[in-house]
Image: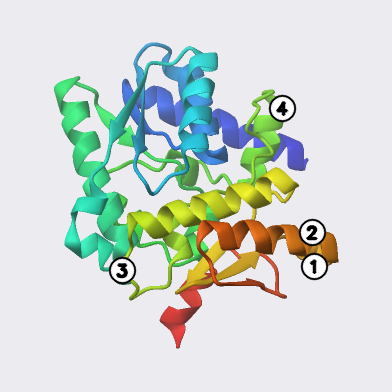
Amino acid sequence: METNSVIKKKDHLRSILKGYGSLLVAYSGGVDSSFLLAVAHEALNKNLLAVTSASPLHPEREIREAIDFAKLLGVEHMVIQSREMQRGDFISNTKERCYLCKKYLIEELLKISNHRNIQHVAHGANIDDLSDYRPGFAAAQEMGIKAPLVDAGLTKNDIRRLSKQMNLITWNKPPMACLATRIPYGTSITIKDLKMIEQAEQVLTNIGFTGCRVRVHDKVARIEVDAGDIERIIDRKTRSLIVEKLRKIGFIHVAVDLEGYCQGSMNRALKL
C-alpha cells in the first residue's frame, strides 16, 4: 500500500511538471534537485534547463558531481558564478542570510529563464523542509518559484526510495547544505573560513565519515558526525589523525559534538 502511495506521488509530480510546458530547475546536485531533474527530464524532455550556482559557499566536489549527473541524464546544464560573497548584507550573516542568498540566486535564474523564454523556475524543496526554519523557501515563494516536490506531497524518504527505484546514483547521497550554515549567525562569512570548512570536511570524508559537518566557532572546529560514528571518531588513532590535519588547516581546537549530526543545529541560537 505504502509503495503504491509513493508511486502515485511520482505520477502526480510528473503530471505537474508536464503542465509547466518548459522549466528551469535550480539544481544543486543533491538528492532532491537531482530527483526533480530526472523526473522533469522524463516529463519535459528537451524543454528543460538545469542551472547550478558555483561559489565559495559550495564544495568544488559537489559542483563536479552535479555536472557529471546532468551529463549522465543528457540534460542541458549551465553553471553560473553567484555573487553572494560580494554583498555586505549576506556576509554579515544575520538570520536573513538564507533568504538573501536565495533571493539573489533567484534573480539570476529569472534573468536566464526570461532570456530563454522558459515558462517556469523550480527548486527542490520537499515536504520535510517545511518543518525547519527555511527563510530561503519564503524567498522562493515570494518570487513565484515552483516547488513541485512539495506540491506532489513528497518527503525526503519518498524521494530516496523513488531515486533508488530509478537507479539514480544520488539516492543515498548524504544531506548537503551550503558551507555558510557551519558559521554561527552574527559571525561574518569569509572566504578563508569557508575554505577551512571545506578542507576539514574533506578530511573527514576521506577517513570515511559521511554526512559530517564541521561547525566553526572562532578557531574551534566542532565536528558533527552520525551518532553511531561517535565511538569511531574518538578512537585514539583516528582522533589524533583528525586533530593533526585540522590544525594544519588552521584550527586551534578540535571538538566532537556528543549529540552527533543534527540538521540545522545552528538555528537553535534563533530560539534563545
Disc nearest the viewer among 3 and 4: 3
Query: Where's the N terminus, which quadrant?
Result: top right
Q: Looking at the rendered structure, which numbered label has been put on residue 188?
A: 3
Q: How far apart are marks 3 and 1 (CA)?
A: 30 Å
Q: Which of marks 4 and 1 is nearer the N terminus?
A: 4
- Colouring used for the render: rainbow
Can see residue 105? Answer: yes
> Do the CB atoms of the residues marked 1 and 2 lie less than 8 Å apart?
yes
Specify the amino acid type for callout 4: Gln
> Do the CB atoms of the residues marked 2 and 3 lie less than 8 Å apart?
no
From the viewer's side, name the closer residue of 164 and 219.
219
Q: Distance between the residues labelled 1 and 2?
A: 7 Å
Q: What element carries label 2?
A: helix
- Give the labeled residue for mark 4: 165
Q: Looking at the rendered structure, which numbered label has been put on residue 114?
A: none
- Give the labeled residue for mark 1: 234
Image height of 79 relative to 266, above or below? above
The reply, left or right, for residue 71 in relation to residue 242 is: left
Task: Give the residue drawn at x 55%, y 72%.
Answer: 252
Q: Looking at the rendered structure, which numbered label has been put on residue 238?
A: 2
Among all residues in the image, which is located at the extreme bottom?
A: 272
Q: Which of marks 3 and 1 is nearer the N terminus?
A: 3
Task: Give the residue drawn at x 67%, y 64%.
Answer: 243
Q: Distance between the residues labelled 3 and 4?
A: 42 Å
Q: Count neighbours of disc 3 (C-alpha within 10 A) and say few if under 14, some if 14 to 19, many if 20 or more.
A: some
Q: Earlier in the sequence, mark 4 or mark 2?
A: 4
Q: Count neighbours of disc 2 (C-alpha within 10 A) and say few if under 14, some if 14 to 19, many if 20 or more.
A: few
Q: Is mark 4 on a helix, strand or loop?
A: helix
> Do the CB atoms of the residues marked 4 and 2 lie less than 8 Å apart?
no
Q: What element carries label 3?
A: loop
Disc nearest the viewer among 2 and 3: 2
